[in-house]
Amino acid sequence: MEYRLLIARRYLRGSRSLVSRITAVSVIGVAVGVASLIVVLSVMNGFFRFVRDMLVSFDPHVRIEAVDPDGISGADSLAAWAATFDGVRSAAPFVEGKAMLSTETGFSVNKVVIVRGIVPDPASEMQAAIDATGYGRFDLERREGLGGILLGRSLGERLALTPGGGGLEASRVSLLSAAAIERRLTQPIGASPAFPFEVRALYALQAAFDENYVFVSLADAQRLFRTGRKASGIDLRLDDLDAAGDVKEALEAALDPRVYSVATWYDLQKSLYDVMRLEKWGASLVLGLIVLVAAFNVIASLTMIVIQKRRDVGILRAMGVPAEGIRAIFLTQGLLIGVVGAGAGLVAGLGLSLLQARFGFVKLSSDDAFLIDAYPVAIEGMDVFVVAAIALVLCVTAAIYPARRASSIEPARAVAAEG
């Protein structure tokens, strides 16, 4: 095998001919394609992790919901039982339903929102998500007869609603459930069925979520929707987000599927996550064409080497080198092109990604439209391995035709023709 490697290396770098230049272009093409793929995949992974981390600040890692729309009876007991599973850090009931949001500012009073009642947790990741907007704090406790409410930043700004602070008084809103609206229409005389709340914070995730979801305490939601002690489901927080699938399987095995359904953080926003992954692999497929074009260049350059070195191949065959040995020489050339090109591409791609992650050279925007100011980067080892492996496989595959052509050369004719 040593002589095959030596000959392959000599053929690739032994001259300054057009063939060598074409080979250099092939190596550069592989390097550019690999580097581009590494950078794009890392940026796509960065966006995915950023969006995921923001969403799971509000969404649970695993959720147990009742199949019956009336909710879950004995939710506290079910939460305590779910908390005993391995990897579960906490479990708490929640209530969710639709209500009409009205304000005291004179803006839209017919905004229907989804109200989610949760158990306030000082250690919740929600505070970190609210800190990103700079508006308010995670506080849902009742004070002076008013419960706290969290609104999406876009909704709050559109309705001129702000949390208190800086000498300003917190805005107040009211929520009416569907049952309360029905009572108002059928019984216009009597106490107002609206529940008043005080705006405590604004959060920002994505436009569709921010415009439609508001958060109150579990007790306030139960009073608003008149559910009593029932809950819509149980939200679970885990020690390891990646263990959500295993916890889901364990819960499904222990719960009656006719009564309860279990969903992970991915299931709760599946359409969004699926689109992001589709974009990632779509962009990768397009950039992969660079490597594919480089592989065609490998075919051209190695075919020209076979023509150029026809007499050398004939001499090697006459000296006793079998056809398999000749094929191995040219397959090794393809492998060397792949190793050098993929290696250079990996160094360049990983280097650019690490520099972006560390210094954030490439900015997203100069305004406040984004929650981050630079493109996020997250390097995943599997992506790096797959990109490098595909580049090597394409280069070796591209060498198969020239290798077969070289191995079919007849020694006598090759030497006689050159002579």
Image (spheres, rainbow, N blue to C red):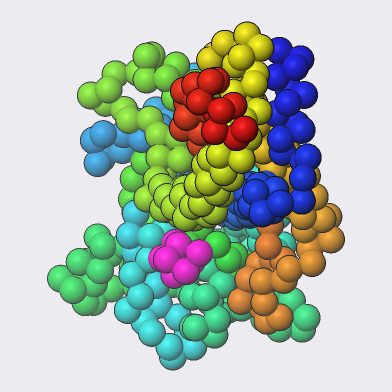
In the image, residue 316 sits, relative to residue 135, either above or below, namely: above
In the image, residue 105 sits, relative to residue 49, either above or below, namely: below
**Magenta highlight on residue 207:** yes
Is residue 284 among what the camera can see? no
Is residue 398 among what the camera can see? yes
In the image, residue 330 sits, relative to residue 395, either above or below, namely: above
Which quarter of the rendered picture does the N terminus lie within? top right
Give the residue displayed 15% in from the left and 71% down from the top.
186
**Magenta highlight on residue 23:** no
Provide residue 314's location: percent of width, then percent of height. 59, 23
Provide residue 289's location: percent of width, then percent of height. 49, 52
Could you say which quadrant of the image residue 355 lies in?
bottom right
Q: Is residue 158 left or right of residue 328?
A: left
Say which of 118 and 152 sits in front. 152
Say which of 283 and 255 sits in front. 283
State the residue lying farthest toward the bottom.
106
Give the residue displayed 53% in from the left and 46% down from the top.
300
Give the residue displayed 61% in from the left and 76% down from the top.
369
Provide residue 396's location: percent of width, then percent of height. 56, 31
Provide residue 99's location: percent of width, then percent of height. 34, 64
Could you say which quadrant of the image residue 399 lies in?
top right
Q: How many marks?
A: 0
Say which of 157 and 309 sits in front. 309
Magenta stretch in the rendered image: 206-213
Q: Is residue 367 left or right of residue 295?
A: right
Which quarter of the rendered picture does the C terminus lie within? top right
